[in-house]
Image (cartoon, rainbow, N blue to C red):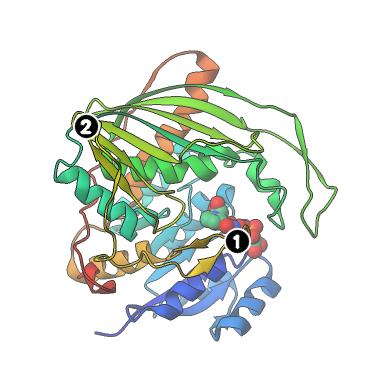
Protein backbone atom coordinates (compact mmCIF):
# COMPACT_ATOMS: atom_id res chain seq x y z
CA UNK A 1 0.00 0.00 0.00
CA UNK A 2 1.31 3.48 -0.84
CA UNK A 3 2.16 6.22 1.62
CA UNK A 4 -0.72 8.26 3.10
CA UNK A 5 -0.83 11.64 1.36
CA UNK A 6 -0.77 14.70 3.64
CA UNK A 7 -1.37 18.43 3.36
CA UNK A 8 -0.19 21.05 5.85
CA UNK A 9 -1.99 24.32 6.65
CA UNK A 10 0.24 26.76 8.55
CA UNK A 11 3.86 27.23 7.46
CA UNK A 12 5.38 29.03 10.46
CA UNK A 13 8.06 28.13 12.98
CA UNK A 14 7.03 24.54 13.78
CA UNK A 15 6.33 23.49 10.18
CA UNK A 16 10.02 22.55 9.69
CA UNK A 17 9.66 19.79 12.27
CA UNK A 18 6.68 18.28 10.43
CA UNK A 19 8.21 18.64 6.98
CA UNK A 20 11.41 16.97 8.22
CA UNK A 21 9.38 14.27 9.99
CA UNK A 22 7.39 13.64 6.82
CA UNK A 23 10.55 13.40 4.71
CA UNK A 24 12.02 10.82 7.16
CA UNK A 25 9.02 8.48 6.99
CA UNK A 26 8.03 5.73 4.56
CA UNK A 27 4.45 5.86 5.85
CA UNK A 28 3.44 9.34 4.65
CA UNK A 29 4.10 11.82 1.85
CA UNK A 30 3.56 15.56 2.30
CA UNK A 31 2.13 16.74 -1.01
CA UNK A 32 1.00 20.32 -0.43
CA UNK A 33 1.38 23.21 2.00
CA UNK A 34 -0.79 26.31 2.42
CA UNK A 35 -0.87 29.41 4.64
CA UNK A 36 -2.84 32.63 5.02
CA UNK A 37 0.47 34.17 3.95
CA UNK A 38 1.18 32.58 0.54
CA UNK A 39 4.84 33.63 0.77
CA UNK A 40 5.27 31.45 3.90
CA UNK A 41 3.86 28.44 2.05
CA UNK A 42 6.04 29.14 -0.99
CA UNK A 43 9.20 29.34 1.13
CA UNK A 44 8.52 25.98 2.82
CA UNK A 45 7.49 24.39 -0.49
CA UNK A 46 10.80 25.44 -2.04
CA UNK A 47 12.81 24.27 0.99
CA UNK A 48 11.21 20.81 1.17
CA UNK A 49 10.32 20.01 -2.44
CA UNK A 50 6.54 20.03 -1.98
CA UNK A 51 3.93 22.26 -3.64
CA UNK A 52 2.46 25.51 -2.28
CA UNK A 53 -1.24 25.90 -3.01
CA UNK A 54 -4.14 28.09 -1.81
CA UNK A 55 -5.92 26.69 1.29
CA UNK A 56 -9.10 25.92 -0.71
CA UNK A 57 -7.14 23.97 -3.31
CA UNK A 58 -5.40 21.92 -0.62
CA UNK A 59 -8.75 21.08 0.96
CA UNK A 60 -10.25 20.14 -2.41
CA UNK A 61 -7.41 17.79 -3.40
CA UNK A 62 -8.89 14.26 -3.47
CA UNK A 63 -5.47 12.64 -3.03
CA UNK A 64 -4.91 14.26 0.40
CA UNK A 65 -6.24 12.08 3.23
CA UNK A 66 -4.99 13.84 6.39
CA UNK A 67 -4.49 17.59 6.77
CA UNK A 68 -2.11 18.81 9.48
CA UNK A 69 -3.15 22.10 11.11
CA UNK A 70 -0.11 24.11 12.21
CA UNK A 71 -1.84 27.47 12.53
CA UNK A 72 -1.88 29.56 15.72
CA UNK A 73 -3.94 28.25 18.69
CA UNK A 74 -6.97 30.51 18.24
CA UNK A 75 -7.35 29.35 14.62
CA UNK A 76 -7.06 25.63 15.43
CA UNK A 77 -10.77 24.94 15.97
CA UNK A 78 -11.97 26.78 12.88
CA UNK A 79 -9.26 25.46 10.55
CA UNK A 80 -9.72 21.86 11.78
CA UNK A 81 -13.50 22.16 11.25
CA UNK A 82 -12.84 23.32 7.67
CA UNK A 83 -10.64 20.24 7.19
CA UNK A 84 -13.41 17.98 8.49
CA UNK A 85 -16.01 19.80 6.35
CA UNK A 86 -13.79 19.05 3.34
CA UNK A 87 -14.09 15.32 4.15
CA UNK A 88 -10.53 14.85 5.44
CA UNK A 89 -9.05 13.65 8.72
CA UNK A 90 -7.54 16.49 10.77
CA UNK A 91 -4.37 16.43 12.87
CA UNK A 92 -3.77 19.61 14.86
CA UNK A 93 -0.89 21.12 16.74
CA UNK A 94 -1.76 21.73 20.38
CA UNK A 95 -3.99 22.87 21.90
CA UNK A 96 -6.88 21.12 20.14
CA UNK A 97 -8.77 24.45 20.04
CA UNK A 98 -8.68 27.91 21.64
CA UNK A 99 -11.02 26.71 24.40
CA UNK A 100 -12.88 23.61 25.54
CA UNK A 101 -16.24 24.62 23.99
CA UNK A 102 -14.56 25.13 20.61
CA UNK A 103 -12.75 21.79 20.97
CA UNK A 104 -16.04 20.06 21.70
CA UNK A 105 -17.65 21.60 18.60
CA UNK A 106 -14.76 20.24 16.55
CA UNK A 107 -15.02 16.73 18.00
CA UNK A 108 -18.82 16.71 17.48
CA UNK A 109 -18.35 17.74 13.83
CA UNK A 110 -15.75 15.01 13.28
CA UNK A 111 -17.92 12.34 14.91
CA UNK A 112 -20.91 13.38 12.78
CA UNK A 113 -18.75 13.20 9.64
CA UNK A 114 -17.18 9.86 10.58
CA UNK A 115 -13.68 11.40 10.40
CA UNK A 116 -10.76 11.32 12.83
CA UNK A 117 -9.13 14.14 14.74
CA UNK A 118 -5.59 13.72 16.03
CA UNK A 119 -3.67 16.22 18.11
CA UNK A 120 -0.18 16.99 19.38
CA UNK A 121 1.66 16.59 21.63
CA UNK A 122 2.84 13.19 20.44
CA UNK A 123 6.00 13.19 22.57
CA UNK A 124 4.50 10.43 24.73
CA UNK A 125 5.16 8.11 21.75
CA UNK A 126 8.91 8.66 22.18
CA UNK A 127 11.29 6.07 23.61
CA UNK A 128 11.63 7.66 27.06
CA UNK A 129 7.93 8.06 27.75
CA UNK A 130 7.07 4.61 26.41
CA UNK A 131 9.80 3.14 28.64
CA UNK A 132 8.27 4.98 31.64
CA UNK A 133 4.83 3.72 30.66
CA UNK A 134 6.18 0.14 30.52
CA UNK A 135 7.88 0.58 33.92
CA UNK A 136 4.64 1.80 35.51
CA UNK A 137 2.47 -0.84 33.84
CA UNK A 138 4.81 -3.59 35.01
CA UNK A 139 4.59 -2.34 38.61
CA UNK A 140 8.14 -0.95 38.90
CA UNK A 141 7.08 1.65 41.52
CA UNK A 142 3.75 0.14 42.61
CA UNK A 143 0.62 2.31 42.51
CA UNK A 144 1.31 5.99 41.80
CA UNK A 145 0.01 8.06 44.70
CA UNK A 146 1.67 11.43 44.08
CA UNK A 147 3.97 13.40 41.87
CA UNK A 148 5.15 16.79 40.68
CA UNK A 149 5.50 18.30 37.21
CA UNK A 150 7.36 21.55 36.64
CA UNK A 151 7.62 23.63 33.49
CA UNK A 152 9.01 27.07 34.22
CA UNK A 153 11.01 29.58 32.20
CA UNK A 154 10.95 33.26 31.38
CA UNK A 155 8.69 32.90 28.39
CA UNK A 156 8.69 33.03 24.67
CA UNK A 157 9.30 36.70 23.86
CA UNK A 158 13.06 36.15 24.13
CA UNK A 159 13.33 33.70 21.22
CA UNK A 160 10.15 33.21 19.13
CA UNK A 161 10.02 35.43 16.01
CA UNK A 162 6.32 36.23 16.53
CA UNK A 163 5.54 35.66 20.23
CA UNK A 164 2.35 37.70 20.65
CA UNK A 165 -0.06 34.73 20.45
CA UNK A 166 1.61 33.08 23.46
CA UNK A 167 0.21 35.81 25.74
CA UNK A 168 -3.33 35.90 24.31
CA UNK A 169 -6.37 33.64 24.86
CA UNK A 170 -5.38 30.14 23.73
CA UNK A 171 -1.77 30.73 24.87
CA UNK A 172 -0.03 31.02 28.26
CA UNK A 173 2.29 28.49 29.95
CA UNK A 174 -0.58 26.12 30.71
CA UNK A 175 -2.08 25.76 27.22
CA UNK A 176 1.29 26.09 25.52
CA UNK A 177 3.63 24.08 27.79
CA UNK A 178 1.75 22.27 30.57
CA UNK A 179 -0.17 20.56 27.75
CA UNK A 180 2.93 18.33 27.26
CA UNK A 181 3.02 17.38 30.94
CA UNK A 182 -0.71 16.74 31.31
CA UNK A 183 -0.80 14.67 28.09
CA UNK A 184 2.20 12.65 29.34
CA UNK A 185 0.44 12.16 32.70
CA UNK A 186 -2.79 10.97 31.04
CA UNK A 187 -0.73 8.51 28.97
CA UNK A 188 0.94 7.24 32.15
CA UNK A 189 -1.90 7.39 34.68
CA UNK A 190 -5.19 7.63 32.77
CA UNK A 191 -7.90 10.31 33.02
CA UNK A 192 -8.23 13.13 35.57
CA UNK A 193 -11.24 13.46 37.88
CA UNK A 194 -10.79 16.98 39.28
CA UNK A 195 -8.46 19.96 39.28
CA UNK A 196 -7.76 22.98 41.46
CA UNK A 197 -5.26 25.82 41.09
CA UNK A 198 -4.07 29.31 41.91
CA UNK A 199 -3.08 31.40 38.86
CA UNK A 200 -1.44 34.80 38.63
CA UNK A 201 0.05 37.23 36.12
CA UNK A 202 3.37 38.75 37.21
CA UNK A 203 3.46 41.67 34.75
CA UNK A 204 0.69 43.18 32.60
CA UNK A 205 2.98 43.55 29.56
CA UNK A 206 5.97 41.77 28.02
CA UNK A 207 8.61 43.41 25.82
CA UNK A 208 9.87 41.35 22.90
CA UNK A 209 13.66 40.89 22.82
CA UNK A 210 13.82 38.54 19.81
CA UNK A 211 14.06 39.56 16.16
CA UNK A 212 12.32 40.78 14.03
CA UNK A 213 9.88 42.34 16.54
CA UNK A 214 12.39 43.53 19.19
CA UNK A 215 10.84 46.27 21.33
CA UNK A 216 7.20 45.32 20.62
CA UNK A 217 5.12 45.54 23.83
CA UNK A 218 2.59 42.73 24.26
CA UNK A 219 -0.40 43.08 26.60
CA UNK A 220 -0.66 39.87 28.64
CA UNK A 221 -4.19 38.40 28.65
CA UNK A 222 -3.51 35.04 30.34
CA UNK A 223 -2.09 33.88 33.69
CA UNK A 224 1.70 33.45 33.47
CA UNK A 225 2.16 31.49 36.72
CA UNK A 226 -0.15 28.61 37.62
CA UNK A 227 0.23 26.18 40.53
CA UNK A 228 -2.31 23.41 40.12
CA UNK A 229 -3.27 20.06 41.62
CA UNK A 230 -4.72 17.18 39.64
CA UNK A 231 -6.59 14.30 41.23
CA UNK A 232 -6.56 11.43 38.75
CA UNK A 233 -9.41 8.90 38.53
CA UNK A 234 -6.83 6.38 39.78
CA UNK A 235 -6.50 8.47 42.98
CA UNK A 236 -3.01 9.84 42.17
CA UNK A 237 -2.55 13.39 43.54
CA UNK A 238 -0.15 15.36 41.31
CA UNK A 239 1.12 18.96 41.66
CA UNK A 240 1.89 20.97 38.54
CA UNK A 241 3.73 24.30 38.30
CA UNK A 242 3.67 26.13 34.97
CA UNK A 243 5.23 29.57 34.69
CA UNK A 244 6.77 32.09 32.33
CA UNK A 245 7.83 34.32 35.23
CA UNK A 246 10.93 32.34 36.27
CA UNK A 247 14.47 33.18 35.09
CA UNK A 248 16.12 30.12 36.68
CA UNK A 249 15.24 27.17 38.92
CA UNK A 250 16.55 23.77 39.98
CA UNK A 251 13.40 21.64 39.99
CA UNK A 252 13.16 18.46 37.90
CA UNK A 253 10.60 18.34 35.07
CA UNK A 254 8.67 15.35 36.29
CA UNK A 255 8.63 13.01 39.32
CA UNK A 256 6.14 10.27 40.17
CA UNK A 257 5.89 8.70 43.63
CA UNK A 258 4.56 5.15 43.97
CA UNK A 259 3.83 2.78 46.83
CA UNK A 260 7.02 0.83 45.97
CA UNK A 261 9.41 3.50 44.66
CA UNK A 262 9.79 6.67 42.61
CA UNK A 263 10.17 7.43 38.90
CA UNK A 264 11.89 10.40 37.23
CA UNK A 265 10.28 11.02 33.85
CA UNK A 266 12.26 13.05 31.26
CA UNK A 267 11.06 16.38 29.83
CA UNK A 268 7.85 15.60 27.90
CA UNK A 269 8.60 18.36 25.39
CA UNK A 270 10.94 15.81 23.77
CA UNK A 271 10.93 12.13 22.85
CA UNK A 272 14.14 10.92 24.51
CA UNK A 273 15.98 11.42 27.80
CA UNK A 274 17.11 9.30 30.72
CA UNK A 275 14.34 7.95 32.92
CA UNK A 276 15.39 6.78 36.39
CA UNK A 277 13.62 4.74 39.07
CA UNK A 278 14.16 3.63 42.64
CA UNK A 279 12.89 0.64 44.55
CA UNK A 280 11.65 2.15 47.83
CA UNK A 281 14.54 4.24 49.24
CA UNK A 282 17.23 2.42 47.19
CA UNK A 283 19.60 4.05 44.73
CA UNK A 284 18.37 5.66 41.50
CA UNK A 285 18.88 3.34 38.52
CA UNK A 286 18.45 4.21 34.83
CA UNK A 287 15.60 2.69 32.82
CA UNK A 288 16.84 1.49 29.41
CA UNK A 289 15.30 3.16 26.37
CA UNK A 290 17.67 1.77 23.69
CA UNK A 291 15.30 -1.07 22.70
CA UNK A 292 12.66 1.47 21.67
CA UNK A 293 12.49 3.72 18.58
CA UNK A 294 12.39 7.54 18.59
CA UNK A 295 14.80 8.23 21.44
CA UNK A 296 18.09 8.97 19.70
CA UNK A 297 18.94 12.71 19.76
CA UNK A 298 18.56 14.27 16.31
CA UNK A 299 18.39 18.01 16.97
CA UNK A 300 20.39 20.65 18.83
CA UNK A 301 18.12 23.23 20.51
CA UNK A 302 18.71 26.97 20.57
CA UNK A 303 20.20 26.50 24.08
CA UNK A 304 22.65 23.87 22.77
CA UNK A 305 20.93 20.75 24.18
CA UNK A 306 21.04 17.58 22.07
CA UNK A 307 17.44 16.32 21.98
CA UNK A 308 15.28 13.67 20.32
CA UNK A 309 12.62 15.50 18.28
CA UNK A 310 10.35 13.23 16.24
CA UNK A 311 7.25 15.48 15.95
CA UNK A 312 4.94 13.83 13.37
CA UNK A 313 4.76 10.42 15.13
CA UNK A 314 1.14 11.11 16.05
CA UNK A 315 0.36 11.57 12.35
CA UNK A 316 2.23 8.37 11.38
CA UNK A 317 0.31 6.43 14.02
CA UNK A 318 -2.97 7.96 12.81
CA UNK A 319 -2.19 7.05 9.19
CA UNK A 320 -1.54 3.42 10.24
CA UNK A 321 -4.64 3.40 12.46
CA UNK A 322 -6.84 4.51 9.54
CA UNK A 323 -5.48 1.68 7.36
CA UNK A 324 -5.77 -0.90 10.15
CA UNK A 325 -9.14 0.27 11.51
CA UNK A 326 -7.74 0.57 15.06
CA UNK A 327 -7.84 3.57 17.46
CA UNK A 328 -5.11 6.18 16.98
CA UNK A 329 -3.03 7.14 19.99
CA UNK A 330 -2.61 10.95 19.86
CA UNK A 331 -6.38 11.24 19.65
CA UNK A 332 -8.76 14.18 19.64
CA UNK A 333 -10.65 12.52 22.53
CA UNK A 334 -7.52 12.59 24.70
CA UNK A 335 -6.70 16.14 23.55
CA UNK A 336 -10.23 17.31 24.43
CA UNK A 337 -9.91 15.80 27.93
CA UNK A 338 -6.51 17.46 28.32
CA UNK A 339 -7.94 20.81 27.11
CA UNK A 340 -10.74 20.56 29.69
CA UNK A 341 -8.11 19.95 32.41
CA UNK A 342 -5.96 22.89 31.25
CA UNK A 343 -8.93 25.26 31.12
CA UNK A 344 -10.03 24.08 34.57
CA UNK A 345 -6.82 25.46 36.14
CA UNK A 346 -7.90 29.01 35.25
CA UNK A 347 -11.54 28.36 36.22
CA UNK A 348 -10.53 26.86 39.58
CA UNK A 349 -8.32 29.84 40.36
CA UNK A 350 -10.86 32.45 39.26
CA UNK A 351 -13.75 30.83 41.15
CA UNK A 352 -11.77 29.51 44.13
CA UNK A 353 -12.95 25.92 43.85
CA UNK A 354 -12.23 22.39 42.62
CA UNK A 355 -13.44 21.75 39.05
CA UNK A 356 -14.74 18.29 38.17
CA UNK A 357 -14.07 17.03 34.64
CA UNK A 358 -17.02 16.25 32.37
CA UNK A 359 -14.87 14.31 29.86
CA UNK A 360 -12.69 11.26 30.22
CA UNK A 361 -10.63 9.15 27.82
CA UNK A 362 -8.94 5.80 27.46
CA UNK A 363 -5.18 5.64 27.92
CA UNK A 364 -3.67 5.25 24.43
CA UNK A 365 -2.35 1.73 23.76
CA UNK A 366 1.33 1.33 24.69
CA UNK A 367 3.79 0.97 21.80
CA UNK A 368 5.81 -2.24 21.59
CA UNK A 369 9.59 -2.41 21.37
CA UNK A 370 11.30 -2.34 17.98
CA UNK A 371 13.74 -0.26 16.04
CA UNK A 372 11.65 1.87 13.71
CA UNK A 373 8.20 3.04 12.64
CA UNK A 374 7.05 -0.57 12.11
CA UNK A 375 5.97 -0.36 15.80
CA UNK A 376 2.85 1.41 14.49
CA UNK A 377 1.81 -1.86 12.79
N1 LIG B 1 7.27 26.96 17.49
C1 LIG B 1 7.42 25.91 18.25
O1 LIG B 1 8.54 25.58 18.72
C2 LIG B 1 6.24 25.02 18.53
C3 LIG B 1 6.50 23.81 19.12
C4 LIG B 1 5.45 22.92 19.32
C5 LIG B 1 4.18 23.31 18.98
N2 LIG B 1 3.92 24.52 18.43
C6 LIG B 1 2.52 24.87 18.09
O2 LIG B 1 2.39 24.94 16.69
C7 LIG B 1 1.43 25.94 16.32
C8 LIG B 1 2.07 26.93 15.39
O3 LIG B 1 3.17 27.52 16.06
P1 LIG B 1 4.31 28.29 15.27
O4 LIG B 1 5.37 28.54 16.27
O5 LIG B 1 4.63 27.56 13.99
O6 LIG B 1 3.52 29.66 14.93
P2 LIG B 1 3.86 30.71 13.79
O7 LIG B 1 3.18 31.97 14.17
O8 LIG B 1 5.33 30.72 13.53
O9 LIG B 1 3.15 30.09 12.48
C9 LIG B 1 1.76 29.99 12.33
C10 LIG B 1 1.43 30.07 10.86
O10 LIG B 1 0.01 29.83 10.68
C11 LIG B 1 -0.48 30.77 9.71
N3 LIG B 1 -1.91 30.98 10.00
C12 LIG B 1 -2.46 31.58 11.07
N4 LIG B 1 -3.80 31.51 11.00
C13 LIG B 1 -4.10 30.84 9.87
C14 LIG B 1 -5.31 30.45 9.24
N5 LIG B 1 -6.50 30.74 9.79
N6 LIG B 1 -5.24 29.75 8.08
C15 LIG B 1 -4.03 29.46 7.52
N7 LIG B 1 -2.84 29.81 8.07
C16 LIG B 1 -2.88 30.49 9.23
C17 LIG B 1 0.37 32.02 9.92
O11 LIG B 1 0.36 32.84 8.76
C18 LIG B 1 1.73 31.43 10.22
O12 LIG B 1 2.51 31.23 9.06
C19 LIG B 1 0.95 26.57 17.64
O13 LIG B 1 -0.24 25.96 18.04
C20 LIG B 1 2.06 26.22 18.63
O14 LIG B 1 1.56 26.08 19.95
C21 LIG B 1 4.94 25.38 18.17
Q: Is residue 158 left or right of residue 302?
A: right
Q: Is residue 271 above or below residue 336?
A: below
For disc 1, the neighbor class at 10 Å (few under 14, some 14 to 19, many from 20) is: few
The Cα atoms of the two marked residues, 1 and 2, are separated by 35 Å
Residue sitting nearer the eye, 220 or 306: 306
**Is residue 9 visible to us here?**
no
Residue occupying the point 27% across, 52% down:
287
Which residue in the structure is indicated by mark 1? Answer: 304
Disc on res. 280: 2
Residue occupying the point 80% across, 60% down:
212
Check disc 1 and report its element: helix, strand or loop. Answer: loop
For discs 1 and 2, the disc positioned in front in the rendered view: 2
Residue 374 in the image: state x and y as whole percent: 23, 74
Choose top left, top right, bottom left or bottom right for residue 105. Answer: top left
Choose top left, top right, bottom left or bottom right for residue 292. Answer: bottom left
Residue sitting nearer the eye, 311 or 304: 304
Q: Is residue 276 above or below residue 79?
A: above
Ligand 1 picture quarter:
bottom right
Amino acid sequence: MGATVLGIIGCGNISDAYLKGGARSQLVRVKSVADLRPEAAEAQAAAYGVQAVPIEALLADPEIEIVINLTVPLAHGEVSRRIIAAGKHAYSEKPLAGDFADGKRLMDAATAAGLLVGCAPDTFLGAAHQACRHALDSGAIGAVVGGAATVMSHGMEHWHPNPEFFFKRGGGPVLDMAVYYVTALVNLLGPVGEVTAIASTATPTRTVSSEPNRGQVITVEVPTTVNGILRFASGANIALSASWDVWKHRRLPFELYGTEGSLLVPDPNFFGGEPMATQRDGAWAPIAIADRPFGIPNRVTRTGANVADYRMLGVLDMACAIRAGRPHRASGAMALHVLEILEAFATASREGRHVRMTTSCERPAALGTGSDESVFG
